[in-house]
Amino acid sequence: MTRTDQRDVVAAVAARAIDGFTSGYGEQPAGAWAAPGRVNLIGEHTDYNDGFVLPFALPQQTVVAVTPRPEPLWTVWSEQSGERIDLDLADVAEPGRVTGWGAYVAGVVWALRDAGFDVPGARLAIASDVPLGAGLSSSAALESAVLTALADLGGLDLPVDDRPALAQRAENVYAGMPCGIMDQSASIRCRDGHALFLDCRSLAVEQIPFDVDAAGLAVLVVDSRAPHRHVTGEYAARRAACEAAARALGVPALRDVPADGLDETLARLDDPVVRRRVRHVVTENRRVLETVALLRAGRVREIGPLLTASHASMRDDFEITVPEVDTAVEAALTAGAYGARMTGGGFGGCVLALIDANRSEPVTAAVKNAYTAQNFTTPHTFTATPSPGAHRHT
């Protein structure tokens, strides 16, 4: 996808949000704010272990058209569901009062108010082309767009670097999903043409050049269309296992377990399942650091084996892949991808493959043929260009 295509994609979604606003509320919005979905190049389930991640923002965006209102009420229309909901102070006074997609909007208002900010009332209309349920952080895109819009409209003294933690709190506490801070950080802090190297303990970031176009490469994203299987409970179980292992090893988080001498460290854990979980996190952190070093040196193709090793670790040690994503990875590699891996929390979702720019069609065909042979639902594919984070669109 070229930069022009990227701008056109956002403009089209923004137009839908603005049209929805004007038809629903009978007036023009004060503006429209956009925030992207993301893919994680490498570093899966390391964020809540205080580790390292390397996501980049997608061209696909969630756009929120907004105008302020004087009273503390928030009316929200969603193009996706066709629903319009009204939120009042009672709804945003405590977590859990609103469920479904509205929880992510109510959660942002709650998190801002809980942090002491005077949040303006508003009318909002939401449109998005971030696929739902594909592991591309559609919820973080929604939270980030709403938070950016309300912060700008209200003139809130909320530095950009502090915004991901508030958006994460909305999802963790209000919506009840125990995600780490990676998704919201990517949606808010990513830059065009870069991947975001994030230290999830210090929250320090470094923008790592990732200009795949200039390298003659592309990142092919395969939406496996696999139904998410018990994802919320399984995600929480993986996090609990990691936290229990850190306590057993006497470290603040698994980020503090050194890769050197890992076998000896693992021998201190009685449960073989927990040992596998720890091995994934420790080796995945090392793979992130090695990937960053290669990208800093401009050796983009050479990250491929690290991507593939990451997938094997997620499959065998963290046990979060499903047959559809494993099939997509294997087919892409057989068709000439330099590396491929599942991206996202797992149990469904997407695969990314690093390929030559002119190989998108044959690699896609190979994946689809492999799916047909397994009687899987036909996957959706697209190429992903590293894109900017949350911003005011109009």
Image (cartoon, helix red, strand yellow):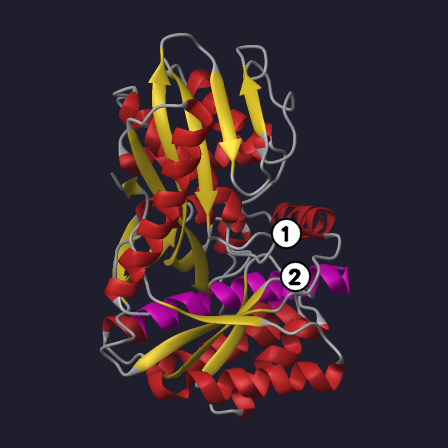
Q: Position of residue 182 (x, y in %)?
A: 45, 49
Q: Report the disc number at residue 242.
A: 1
Instruction: Identify which residue, 317 or 57, lies in the foreground.
Output: 57
Circles 1 and 2 in contact, beta carbons < 8 Å? yes
**Mark 2 neighbour class, 10 Å CA radius: few under 14, some 14 to 19, many 20 or more:** many
Q: Tag 1, which secondary structure?
A: helix
Amino acid tagged 1:
Cys
Task: Return the x and y of residue 248 as percentages of the image width and height.
Answer: 66, 49
User: With respect to residue 158, does 88 lie above or below?
Assistant: above
Q: The residue under label 2 is which amino acid type?
A: Arg
Give the mark count: 2
* Sequence-earlier tag: 1 or 2: 1
When the figure is inspected, residue 244 is found, relative to residue 144, above or below; the finding is: below
Pick whichever, 24 or 309, lies toward us.
24
Is residue 223 at least partly visible in the picture? yes
Quadrant (top left/top right/bottom left/bottom right) for the C terminus: top left
Q: Residue at x 48, y 53 (%)?
A: 130
Magenta-span inclusion, residue 292: yes
- Quarter holding the N terminus is bottom left
What range of the chain is rendered magenta? 264-293
The question of residue 78 being in magenta is answered with no
Question: Callout 1: few (<14), some (14-19), or many (20+) C-alpha neighbours within 10 Å?
Answer: many
Judging by the rendered image, the residue that carries numbered circle 2 is 277
Q: Determine the main secondary structure of the stretch shown in magenta.
A: helix
Placement of 379 over or under 172, stated as above or below: below
- Measure the alpha-carbon separation of dots 1 and 2: 7 Å
